[in-house]
């Protein structure tokens, strides 16, 4: 009976299970779909799985996939470099498009002359990618780097390019044109200075050493910075400086992919100086003259006329900033990229146009442009061909045509005159329409801007690369040979079409109005100027062996290369490297790397041209140990690494054969070096141009880097930290302990020693909630330097010594407030030749000898380590993208002793220059306790308050909202009707907000330079 009941229950249970399975089967369905990339083309090999289940599949070559899924299931689709898609199942078919990830995490990263696994690197390498670069609206990709990379410090020095327009030769009235030797390598980045751990990095574009910063960010795949000596050791005598490694986009197989981007922007100046209105200028100039014991220049009626603008020709009040500068200027960029190909041959073609206008006003009556401007055309092509199964050939061509423009008077001179010309100097035009001017100011500012003609600069640049790779695996598995060749030609010239108009001063009397003519009328010139010519050649041959033996990975490279440069009329400079590098890893857990380099440069004395440099590094990924891997599943990487290198720096700073004594002729004009006869008449002769240094050699460095790489939570949280200690020795410096008995200048010698230490930290977190993606990537760097040795002259007092101070420490007097009374001024130590008065700066007499002189100079900068940081954050959701970049610097000092703005009334051809709002805080007896500036003076010979001192040191800390980008990717359902793969509309900006501790001027770009710009940009990107 019991047995019968058990059988009955078993039968019933079996039926229920069968019915449940049939119900579940009925709920499951085959869901098929097609996956597209941002161009609307099929995306193969993407992983597709059901969220919460282990079932998965991959897309095929046509982007199609099929998978069993229920009606309430969620599909998850992943592909490297793209945002993960989570799509709820609705129906049985779907069409999906993936979008680029803002911060990709590829398995390998670019390193010098190759790629390396991200997990196996034992040096310090940081990388940014296309999306992080292309959101910055600027003419150079350097603008996109500040705040994004730990260890890379930047400072902008101009808001516009500063092209060279001078001859590359000297002119002698007897000999003719004399070539000017020792030209430096040209650089198209004149706007932003970059320092990597205190050194100017070597720029390498696709394996070629060239300082090219004008490549369109749309065409750049990535920019890596190589910070440690091991990562740069293959450069030999250029290995000390670090590397800025630019990798452009390469050809990819597939149907033709077309991307077109058009964008237009408005530029606006930040933190322009604020000149005083004419009446206030006149009032304060009278005060300054009275302080100097002179009679006032202006009467009360003059000040009233300035204030009320009742006589604009005799009492002008001209805001020259408004007269010659526009409030904004346009900029536009266009980019077209096409790539594709088959399994045998692949191609990529990129075209770019950049147009930028300056802020100078123009005159429509001119038949030519007088504004500052830039027009640039770029072409970048890449062809990659598998000639045979073993032989691959790659060819690249980069071409650049660039045309620049500026007023004929010169943009720099116009800005300099703008800084110094007061509102009361002269009217723009006189009553009869002639240009205003005076006997002292013989050019008119607006005339110099509008009517001085123009100077046009032109440059042409061609780079041609050929890469060969032959697989020798048939002889020895893992063996290959590579060859690279590059030929580059660059030329720059200028056309000077400048001219100059007369100016007139209007004199009004009771009987007549007369005009006095001043200056010179110069007809328009038509001069062609050869500015620069350069030829580059680079050849490299490398033998590579890369093999995996079970858990043992071995990579060996032996290479030889030569780089030759010819600048203008110089003899060729030839740098040669013979190197070897070995990399070993065990089970992706233990890592070893070592390299040696024999490097030479032909501009050193024969027999002293070659040196040996070496480096090594180790790494240990603790997370791959079984006791961690099997127990701490959330920890993906915990790698400790260290590198040591002995590097060199001897190509860019070695001069032009300075080990050879050179001479020059003095032809006797104006007094020769010899006098002959009873009349002691001058005669021609030859003289030394300074002493030769037969022992000159390269500078050396010993660099230590210790780092940690941590990755957690399926690589969503990544942290990288580094400590470095770099000791630079044999630095080229002029001896301090020298005498002038020889009558010749001493040459630089290898005597200096500096040390740079610091730490860097980068934290990146990326995550998603359903299809809401967000990220934050923050970095911070702390950097300290110290002069360990310099051959300074003997100094009696410790506070005078330069040794032991931070590198580049400025020296000056210690300001101790203001002298408050005549008694205090008379009893205080002073600078010889000056009799200070109340309201002057009070300097500390450090040695108490009653005199302020060089023995009272001490460090006036900061001893604190410089800290610079950045934070990039963003979100993306349903096609909407928002990102922002914050960047700042602290423990920074800014020396602001531009006395045109800080003191006013500076000497300007025997008249008084402009004054600015800063001086309203000047010392007077009534403001003695609250004054922020010394008493006013207009005496051109009174430089007491201009002495280098702590008074002119300001807090240079600042914080910028550097970049914001807002974009919207139109849904694929909309754009597919127009047979497009994707359309993105976007708006972004540069330098949107700045907070500075001292905000009279911009914390980076000082007064007198072309002002830093805020840029507001909009555009559209179309892909198909």
Image: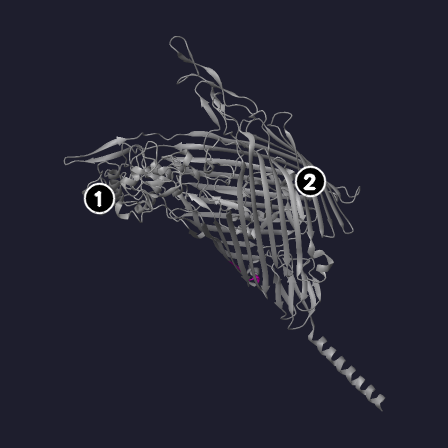
Q: Is residue 226 visible?
A: no
Identify the mark nearer the N-term, 2 or 1.
Answer: 1
Q: Residues within 10 Å of mark 2 (few under 14, many from 20)?
A: many
Q: Residue furthest front?
A: 848
Q: In this figure, which residue is indicated by the disc labeled 1?
A: 303
Q: In this figure, which residue is indicated by the disc labeled 2?
A: 595
Image position of 680 with respect to 692: above or below:
above
If the image is split into quadrants, where does the N terminus sit? bottom right
Location of residue 480 by image quarter:
top right
Image position of 969 with respect to 698: above or below:
below
Residue at the image position 64 percent from the left and 71 percent from the top: 91
Q: Residues within 10 Å of mark 1 (few under 14, many from 20)?
A: some
The spot of residue 198 in percent (x, y) is 54, 42
Q: Quick check: 497 left or right of 595? A: left
Residue 387 disc label: none
Q: Is residue 969 inside the magenta stretch? A: yes
Q: Quick check: 601 left or right of 802? A: right
The part of the chain drawn in magenta is 967-972
- Decide which of 813, 744 is in the foreground and name it: 813
Marks 2 & 1, CB-CB < 8 Å contact = no
If the image is split into quadrants, where does the C terminus sit? bottom right
The spot of residue 279 in percent (x, y) is 25, 45
Query: Disc 2 on helix, strand or loop?
Result: strand
- Decide which of 315, 903 is in the foreground and name it: 903
Question: How many marks overall?
Answer: 2
Callout in the foreground (2, 1) = 2
Query: Disc 1 on helix, strand or loop?
Result: helix
Q: Quick check: 191 left or right of 441? A: right
Q: Is residue 834 visible?
A: yes
Q: Is residue 940 inside the magenta stretch? A: no
Calculate the distance from the C-alpha at mark 2 to the C-alpha at mark 1. 75 Å
Colour pattern of the rendering: one colour
């Amino acid at each position: 009976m019991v047995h019968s009941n058990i059988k009955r229950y078993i039968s019933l249970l079996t039926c229920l299970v069968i019915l449940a399975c049939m119900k579940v089967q009925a709920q499951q369905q085959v869901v098929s779909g097609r996956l597209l990339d941002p161009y609307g083309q099929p995306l193969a090999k993407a992983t597709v799985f059901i969220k919460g289940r282990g079932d998965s599949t991959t897309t095929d070559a046509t982007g199609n996939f099929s998978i069993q899924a229920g009606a309430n299931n969620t599909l998850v689709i992943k592909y490297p470099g793209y945002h993960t898609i989570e799509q709820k199942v609705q129906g049985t078919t779907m069409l999906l498009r993936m979008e680029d990830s803002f911060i990709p995490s590829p398995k390998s990263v670019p390193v010098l002359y190759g790629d390396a696994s991200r997990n196996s690197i034992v040096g310090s390498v940081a990388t940014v990618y296309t999306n992080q670069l292309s959101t910055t609206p600027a003419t150079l990709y350097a603008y996109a780097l500040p705040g994004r990379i730990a260890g890379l410090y930047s400072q902008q020095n101009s808001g516009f390019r500063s092209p060279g327009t001078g001859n590359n030769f000297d002119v002698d009235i007897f000999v003719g044109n004399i070539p000017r030797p020792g030209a430096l390598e040209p650089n198209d980045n004149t706007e932003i200075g970059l320092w990597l751990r205190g050194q100017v990095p070597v720029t390498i574009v696709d394996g070629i050493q060239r300082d090219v910063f004008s490549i369109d960010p749309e065409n750049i795949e990535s920019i890596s910075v190589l910070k440690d000596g091991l990562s740069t050791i293959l450069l030999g005598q250029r290995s000390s400086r670090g590397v800025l490694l630019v990798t452009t986009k390469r050809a990819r197989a597939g149907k033709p992919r077309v991307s077109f981007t058009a964008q237009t922007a408005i530029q606006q100046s930040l933190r322009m100086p604020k000149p005083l209105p004419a009446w206030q200028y006149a009032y304060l100039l009278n005060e300054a003259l009275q302080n100097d014991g002179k009679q006032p220049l202006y009467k009360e009626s003059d000040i009233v006329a300035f204030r009320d603008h009742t006589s604009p020709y005799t009492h002008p009040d001209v805001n020259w900033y408004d007269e010659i500068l526009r409030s904004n200027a346009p900029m536009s960029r266009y980019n077209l990229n096409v790539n594709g190909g088959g399994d045998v041959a692949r191609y990529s073609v990129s075209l770019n146009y950049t147009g930028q206008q300056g802020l100078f006003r123009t005159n429509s009556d001119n038949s030519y442009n007088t504004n500052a401007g830039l027009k640039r055309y770029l072409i970048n092509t890449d062809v990659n061909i598998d000639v045979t199964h073993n032989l691959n050939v790659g060819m690249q061509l980069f071409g650049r045509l660039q045309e620049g423009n500026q007023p004929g008077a010169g943009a720099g001179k116009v800005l300099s005159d703008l800084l110094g010309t007061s509102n009361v100097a002269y009217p723009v035009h006189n009553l009869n329409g002639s240009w205003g001017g005076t006997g002292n100011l013989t050019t008119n500012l607006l005339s110099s801007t509008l009517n001085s003609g123009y100077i046009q600069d032109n440059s042409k640049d061609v780079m041609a690369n050929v890469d060969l790779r032959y697989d020798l695996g048939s002889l020895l598995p893992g063996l290959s040979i590579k060859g690279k060749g590059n030929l580059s030609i660059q030329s720059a010239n200028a056309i000077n079409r400048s001219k100059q108009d007369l100016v007139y001063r209007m004199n009004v009397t009771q009987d007549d109005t007369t005009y006095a003519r001043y200056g010179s009328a110069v007809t328009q010139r038509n001069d062609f100027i050869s500015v620069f010519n350069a030829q580059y050649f680079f050849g490299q041959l490398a033998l590579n062996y890369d093999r995996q033996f079970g858990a043992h990975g071995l990579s060996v490279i032996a290479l030889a290369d030569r780089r030759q440069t010819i600048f203008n009329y110089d003899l060729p400079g030839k740098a040669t490297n013979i190197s070897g590098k070995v990399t070993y890893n065990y089970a992706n857990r233990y890592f070893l790397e070592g390299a040696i380099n024999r490097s030479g440069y032909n501009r050193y004395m024969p027999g002293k041209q070659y040196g040996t440099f070496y480096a090594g590094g180790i790494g240990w990924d603790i997370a791959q140990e079984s006791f961690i891997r099997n127990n701490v599943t959330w920890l993906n990487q915990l790698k400790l690494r260290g590198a040591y290198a002995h590097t060199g720096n001897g190509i860019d700073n070695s001069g032009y054969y300075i080990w050879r004594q050179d001479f020059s002729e003095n032809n006797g004009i104006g007094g020769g070096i010899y006098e002959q006869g009873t009349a002691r008449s001058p005669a021609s002769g030859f003289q030394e141009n300074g002493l030769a240094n037969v022992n000159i050699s390269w500078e050396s460095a010993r660099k230590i880097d210790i780092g940690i790489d941590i990755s957690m939570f399926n690589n969503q949280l990544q942290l990288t930290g580094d400590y470095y200690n770099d000791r630079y020795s044999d630095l080229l410096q002029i001896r301090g302990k020298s005498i002038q008995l020889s009558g010749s200048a001493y040459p630089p010698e290898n005597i200096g020693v500096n040390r740079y230490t610091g730490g860097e930290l980068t934290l990146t977190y990326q995550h998603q909630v359903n299809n809401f993606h967000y990220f934050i990537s923050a970095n911070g760097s702390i950097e300290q330097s110290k002069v360990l040795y310099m051959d300074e002259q003997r100094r009696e007092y410790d506070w005078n010594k330069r040794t032991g101070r931070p590198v580049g420490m400025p020296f000056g007097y210690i300001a101790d407030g203001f002298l408050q009374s005549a008694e205090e001024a008379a009893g205080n130590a002073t600078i010889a030749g000056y009799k200070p008065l109340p309201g002057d700066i009070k300097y500390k007499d450090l040695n108490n000898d009653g005199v302020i002189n060089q023995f009272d100079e001490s460090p006036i900068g900061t001893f604190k380590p410089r800290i610079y940081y950045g934070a990039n954050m963003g979100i993306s959701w349903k096609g909407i993208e928002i990102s922002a970049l914050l960047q700042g610097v602290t423990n920074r000092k800014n020396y602001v002793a531009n006395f045109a703005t800080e003191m006013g009334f500076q000497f300007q051809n025997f008249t008084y220059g402009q004054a600015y709002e800063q001086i309203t805080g000047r010392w007077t007896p009534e403001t003695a306790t609250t004054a922020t500036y010394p008493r006013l003076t207009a005496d051109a010979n009174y430089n007491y308050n201009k002495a280098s001192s702590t008074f002119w040191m300001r807090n240079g800390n600042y914080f910028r909202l550097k970049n914001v980008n807002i974009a919207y990717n139109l849904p694929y359902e909309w754009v597919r009707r127009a047979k497009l793969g994707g359309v993105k509309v976007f708006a972004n900006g540069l330098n949107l907000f700045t907070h500075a501790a001292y905000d009279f001027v911009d914390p980076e770009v000082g007064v007198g330079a072309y002002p830093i710009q805020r840029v507001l940009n909009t555009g559209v990107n179309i892909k198909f």
